[in-house]
Image (tube, rainbow, N blue to C red):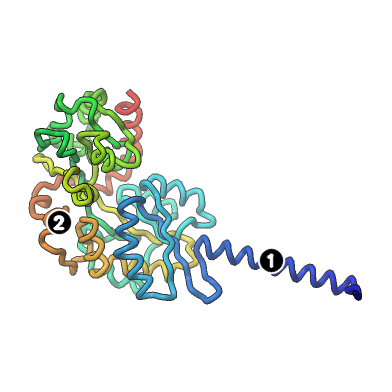
Amino acid sequence: MASVPRPLAAVAGVAATVLLVTSCASSATTASGGSDAGGKQTISFMGFYGTFQDSFTKTVIKPFEKANPDISVKYVPIQNSAEVLAKLRASKKNPAADVALMDSSVAPTANKEGLFAKLDTAKVPNLAELVEEARSKDGYGPGLTLDSLSILYNTEAVDKAPTSWNDLWDKAHRGRLAMPIADTRGVALIVALEKVLGEDYKKDIDPAIDRLKELAPSVETWQPSPDVYTAVQSGEADVAVGWNARGQFYADSSDGVVQPVLPEEGTVKQINTINLVAGSPRADAAQKFIDYAIGAEAQKAFDEDAYYAPVNRNTELKSEVAERTTASAEQQKRQIPVDWNWMTSQYTTWVDRIKREVIGA
């Protein structure tokens, strides 16, 4: 067999190496979000895990991909806003996602750190259809979901349904509480307790912290696994604090074993924002996805499946669904006002105090 001249062999070897490197790079880009050989773009969406992911994929992502066959969406599940913030900080030079969900009390921090980018209103026209509380005053990501804090209980284990925040201290529930409050749930609970105690959360949260310290001995778990809703359904806990939307979802899926309660003293509304990650090389596709997600059609499909109140003013939910969301007349009447813009500067301090003084006591 004739030998290949050395210069030609060297060229062939270099060509093969380049081909291999190019192939690997192309595969890596497609896996993390990018464009495949056919020019189809893949954007990465960082959103909450569990039932949220299941519902959002079914009612928003799949219809979006069908309407936009040149774009696919890779779902990156996360637990909470703190995890999103940490991941984006760690990947600032090479963003870990193109679009990310984040609690409205944490998102301003990400905005100030340059982790999120402002939206182009021409590319996200549905911004004009948002209800006032879902609008971003500074041009960053708008609200995607509206929810509220709730008491959850196991209907098979609890004889007398809780009706008040004070019922968390009922001796009947001692050792049977699930309280995952080292995040926004705890911040919202402090605001609610301050109202119950006749205090002003902007001036002094010591009364609410002291009240939670009294509750600590009755808590069975501060971090139920995989989540508080499953813990209540399985009987690991009898009573807990969680979000209304997921509570309503589990009320259906558990055949009524899990039941969310709107406390008589009122509740605190919470907003999750949908954001364009700064530095995304797929900003146009990402903004198209954001626009779709806040549109009336997607909002109706998702909210009727997951029990969030819509952020698009042109969305009309079925009456039987709307009555179980924070959009209901009863929920609106019992909303405890919160200055979330002010809360941004206090959020980390409050969560740290909960961890240190309540959970760590």
Considering the image in quadrants, where does the C terminus appear? top left
Q: Is residue 229 visible?
A: yes
Badge nearest the viewer, 1 or 2: 1
Residue drawn 41% across and 59% down? 75
User: Compared to 6, does 351 lie above or below?
Assistant: above
Element on which disc 1 rests: helix
Q: Residue at x 22, y 61 (%)?
A: 311
Q: Kindly identify the amino acid type of the residue bearing the numbered disc 2.
A: Ala
Q: Position of residue 104 (x, y in %)?
A: 30, 51
Q: Nearer the viewer, residue 155 or 195?
A: 155
Identify the residue at the far front of this view.
Answer: 1
Q: How many marks?
A: 2
N-term-proximal mark, 1 vs 2: 1
**Number of residues whose C-alpha sits closer than 10 Å to that of mark 1, classed few (under 14), some (14–19) or many (20 or more):** few
| Foreground residue among 350 and 20 | 20
Q: Residue visible at 19% across and 57% down?
A: 309
Left or right relative to 217: residue 113: right
Residue 130 falls in image quadrant:
bottom left
The secondary element bearing badge 2 is classed as loop
Q: Give the number of the disc on residue 297.
A: none
Q: Residue 134's spot in the image, x, y percent?
A: 24, 59
Read off the residue under disc 2: 327
- Place of residue 270 in the rendered image (x, y in percent of width and height, measured from the top left): 24, 49
Q: Quadrant of the N terminus?
A: bottom right
Name which quarter of the figure residue 23 lies in. bottom right
Q: Residue at coordinates 25% horizontally, 23% vertically from top-left?
A: 217
Q: In the rendered view, does 50 fall on the left or right side of 92?
A: left
On the image, numbered disc 1 is attached to which residue? 20
